[in-house]
Amino acid sequence: MNAGRPNSDGERDADIIPISAGEHHRAGTGRRGHAFGRDGPGATGAGTGAGGGAAEDRTEPAHDGHGPIERELAAGLRFLRRRLVGDYEVDEFGFDPEFAETFLFPLARTLYRHWFRVEMAGLEHLPDKGAALIVANHSGTLPIDAVMLQTGIHDHADRILRLLGADLVYQVPFLGHLSRKSGHTLAHPADTARLLAKGELVGVFPEGFKGVGKPFRERYHLQRFGRGGFVASALRGQVPIIPCAIVGAEEIYPKIADLRPLARLLGFPYFPITPTFPWLGPLGLVPLPSKWIIQFGEPVPMSDYEPDAADDALTVFNLTDQIRETIQHMLYDVLLRRGSAFSR
Amino acid sequence: MSSMRASGTARVVLVTGVSRPLGARVATALQADPGIERVIGVDTVPPTTTLGRTEFVRVDIRTPSIAKVIASAEVDTVVHLNLVTSSTGARAPMKEINVIGTMQLLAACQRSPHMRKLVVRSSAAVYGSSPRDPAVFTEDDEPVEAPSSGYAKDAVEVEGYVRGLMRRRSDLTVSLLRFANFIGLGVDSPLTRYFRMPVVLTVLGFDPRLQFVHLDDGVEVLRRMAVEEHPGTYNVAGDGVLLLSQAIRRAGRPTLALPAQAVATIGDMGRRFAGWSGYSAELQRWLTYGRVLDTSKLAAELTWRPKYSTEAAFADYVLAERPDGDPPLTVIDRLADVVGGIRR
């Protein structure tokens, strides 16, 4: 366990003091303009990785004789100005750290803490720095599990998870560029290799749409793991694969049926019918507040193999199966540990 | 394979497209080199600027007369910059110049016993733009969706003919340069025309990653390719990327985001009836999905980096277009003064 990295217990401690959390929230709006700082307890302990303007604004010295509200307003205006003139940087994949720190993570953090009450376990398996490939199960009809995984890793391990998305994501208006701004990119061997070579922590859901869009009755049953492309990438890059089990996402939008003709018409991979959608209209888009646990497993090193093993189909298939089995077992274990889906 | 000037190369240089800004600049850079005896510039129209000791020959490269020039002047180096990316007129003559012109020129090169080196300006447009592209293109990548229209298709065909010549004249040193979009003083391209539209149309829900290359850097790369030995295909672009939204905000232009189909319809109407020569289907694809180049091969070969990053190149363009600030920002700055928090 690494010093300075809060574990899941730290997170749970934070969660069983709802009063202080609430206070912090209310105070937050006045004191620091909640969009510009990390709100909630644990934020200070969760590392100071706030890149871009967010960190700068908070370390502003308080000696200029202005009240906190004015300072906040000024910081807000500065931020607005930067965004309006386009004075921020994105990397070659389109990742916009300022956007992530200011909009994505604060929004997702609220869901993460208070709606899904996510617990992260096995954080000691994540490397402090350097490349690794996190392989997780995918579920929930809408890929909210991806955002939760990214937010948790950001808050607790102080790393930006670079997720790999299906090509459909990049065809859909808004989704594609939001995904790039959040640090994701296309699940393409070249992109994976490039990210791993830069020492990034890369995340992939090999089940793809088969996983996220599977019917509720098949919950927690892993689908086929693509064609093992992720194993080939890890072998070529000689980076460890970290299996990850996400429990809780299956219950957020229980997909009980699929309107295929409508899906085909709209160009979606499926058109879900859930107990609340589309019956309740927009209200049906509110995810059910299931209890989540995200568990990381023992890293599987690729250094036992030669990089050339990526071209040996049998090695790739065997490793793919091995990792799939590992995650399936982790899922069953964590499910037992969690108990009821809507427990505290 | 690297750099030293082999004795006897680049004695007589022929530059095509010399009446346009890039050609004129390259001719000027080459004639400053005392090692080059003669610089011959050819184009179909007379140059608008003085070319110094560059000898201008008015010749249509679509006709066999280009072969006479090459043979009689004992040209040893051809710098082919004639790719027209932005025809002000109809499509057919542009294709003639790009494709038939290149065929004639290459036929002449193949025949001439004095020929030693060929430098060809191509375009990054050969990679196309699609949602299934890798985030960053290297020279070895094939387009996911090959360009099917406009100058991008011409560039693909031109590259095909250049490869054909390389097979037939393996003694030639051939440098093929895939440039990102040029920007800088005097550059007139579909892009600069696009930014000059009264209201800049963007595709709703897409924010592509763009790259630019400054004219100065483009000239320097072409000059070095002409006087040194750097066979191969190279991407040329300023470091870093800009999102379209950033670029538009930095240029202070008003925008209108419309669904893709509407942009296509309006753009097409504009091209037909309002003389928007900048608009084309391939421009729209680029403005939807963007494109980023890996320029490390060029940097390693020349041990050189562009003087202007993508950001700096664009800033230079904005400075030339719009020397004063824009109204929404003055409002924010005024507000910030009232608040009194901005003390930087």
Image (spheres, grey):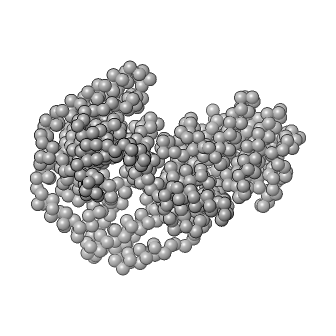
Left or right, A248 with respect to A272, comes to left
Q: Is residue B335 above or below residue B46?
A: below
Relative image position of residue B318 (x, y in whole percent)? 57, 64
Q: Can the viewer see residue B243? A: no
Viewer-proximal residue among A91 and B252:
B252
Point 66% across, 37% down: residue: B230
**Residue at the far front in the pictured view:** A261
- Looking at the rendered image, the quarter that the N terminus of chain A falls into is top left
Left or right, B292 with respect to B182, comes to left
Quadrant of res A114: bottom left
**Residue at the far bottom in the pictured view:** B338
Relative image position of residue B140 (x, y in whole percent)? 56, 35
Left or right, A302 with respect to B321, comes to left
Relative image position of residue A36 (x, y in whole percent)? 30, 62
Point 79% across, 58% down: residue: B47
Q: Is residue B186 above or below residue A157?
A: below
Viewer-proximal residue among A129 and B247:
B247
Point 54% across, 46% down: residue: B129
Q: Is residue B325 above or below residue B114?
A: below
Q: Can the viewer see residue B47? A: yes
Point 53% across, 54% down: residue: B287
Relative image position of residue B244 (x, y in whole percent)? 50, 57
Viewer-proximal residue among B337 and B233:
B233
